Image: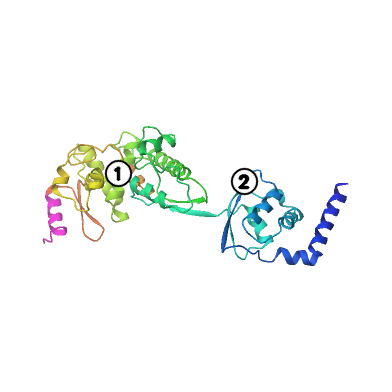
């Protein structure tokens, strides 16, 4: 009886399509879209008939009943996946079905860059294409509570990477992924830390990694820079790193760091306060995280930029002053 019903269904479809040859021709003909691309949303639980109607509702010139029969005839009608799709010109009924069955949703991407602070992250989220802005207007505190981390400062808590998302996704969902990625990376780095590391917790490692990220000009110097800060922590010497001062100045920083800025006390000023600052100052990447927990073996306490992206490292203040004179003041 079931086979008889299916046969009748196929016969009816062939009659409507004008025979098998006509059916083969139709499923391979480009659909007429109202624009170069149109959005199609397939909600969970939508029936194949409803999906065919949704395609027609986009303005695509197709008979929904005919499309529904094609879905049924293919035997894949129950394999169509919910999601947000972008239909583009040249799509045929055959390729449309393939896209829906494979779940090839329309995606966009957001790049979170190593060394960005959280203000820059929020600005990028606000500009992201087709991303629902759930967090717009939220304070940082409210945002972290929304993410399930109430009371935690957001700085440095999101892993810099490229995140793809479906059209209609929320910025909250993207931030959740980035936060979980950083949690995993930090946990792995802390588990691989050196035995003599002068840090008390994974959070300390995250803070130090953020400083290393901002101080590194060349990747090869990263572990040595981490070593300088680790050595300073060991002997109780102030970190005296400019990026922390700049971070503490916030929007007041005009791009020119002055002597008075170094003397202006903020919680992040490592010239006026000992030890690590209270929070990270940026998003560190994987390499900076590893450098922070596995610094180079050295006795260096100072470094200065050579002007080509690399740094000159010194073990004594006298040697450092000579390096500063050579590379920063043009001395010989």
Q: Position of residue 306 (x, y in %)?
A: 21, 58
Q: Which residue is mark 2?
A: 43
Look at the numbered discs 2 and 1 and tell me whether their residues touch, using CB distance below 8 Å. Answer: no
The correct choice, above or below, for 1 with respect to 67 in the image is above
The image position of residue 281, as x and y in percent, is 30, 44
Asked where in the image residue 67 lies, by quadrant, the reply is bottom right
SS at mark 2 in the image:
loop
Q: How many marks?
A: 2
Instruction: Check the image and tell me how it is coloured.
Output: rainbow
The residue under label 1 is 281
Q: Residues within 10 Å of mark 2 (few under 14, many from 20)?
A: few
Left or right, residue 108 beside residue 294? right
Does residue 206 appear left or right of residue 65 in this picture?
left
Left or right of 234? Residue 181 is right
Q: Which residues are magenta?
A: 318-331
The CA distance from mark 2 to mark 1 is 41 Å
Residue 297 in view here: no
- Residue 106 x/y as whole percent: 55, 55
In percent of the image, x 17 and y 46: which residue is there? 261
SS label for mark 1: loop
Magenta stretch: includes residue 319:
yes
Q: Tell me if residue 257 is in the magenta stretch.
A: no
């Amino acid at each position: 009886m079931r086979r008889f019903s299916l046969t009748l269904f196929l016969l009816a479809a062939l009659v409507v399509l004008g025979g098998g040859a006509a059916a083969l021709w139709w499923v391979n003909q480009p659909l007429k879209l109202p624009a170069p691309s149109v959005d199609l949303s397939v909600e969970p639980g939508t029936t194949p008939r409803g999906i065919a109607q949704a395609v027609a509702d986009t303005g695509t010139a197709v008979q929904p009943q005919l499309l529904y029969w094609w879905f049924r005839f293919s035997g894949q009608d129950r394999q169509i996946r919910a999601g947000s799709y972008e239909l583009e010109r040249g799509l045929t009924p055959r390729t449309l079905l393939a896209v829906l069955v494979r779940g090839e949703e329309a995606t966009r991407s957001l790049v979170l860059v190593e060394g960005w602070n959280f203000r820059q992250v929020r600005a990028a989220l606000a500009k992201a294409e087709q991303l629902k802005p759930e967090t717009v207007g939220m304070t940082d505190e409210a945002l972290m509570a929304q993410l399930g981390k109430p009371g935690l400062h957001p700085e440095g808590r999101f892993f810099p990477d490229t995140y793809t998302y479906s059209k209609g996704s929320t910025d909250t969902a993207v931030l959740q992924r980035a936060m979980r990625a950083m949690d995993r990376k930090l946990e792995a780095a802390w588990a691989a830390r050196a035995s003599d590391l002068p840090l008390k917790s994974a959070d300390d490692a995250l803070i130090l990694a953020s400083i290393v990220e901002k101080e590194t000009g060349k990747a090869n110097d990263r572990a040595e820079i981490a070593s300088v800060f680790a050595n300073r922590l060991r002997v109780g010497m102030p970190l005296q790193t400019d990026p922390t001062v700049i971070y503490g100045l916030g929007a007041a920083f005009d791009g020119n760091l002055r002597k008075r800025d170094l003397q202006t006390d903020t919680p992040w000023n490592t010239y006026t306060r000992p030890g690590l600052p209270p929070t990270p100052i940026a998003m560190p990447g994987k390499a900076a995280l590893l450098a922070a927990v596995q610094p180079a073996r050295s006795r260096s306490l100072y470094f200065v930029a050579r002007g080509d992206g690399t740094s000159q490292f010194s073990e004594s203040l006298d040697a450092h002053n000579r390096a500063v004179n050579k590379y920063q003041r043009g001395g010989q």
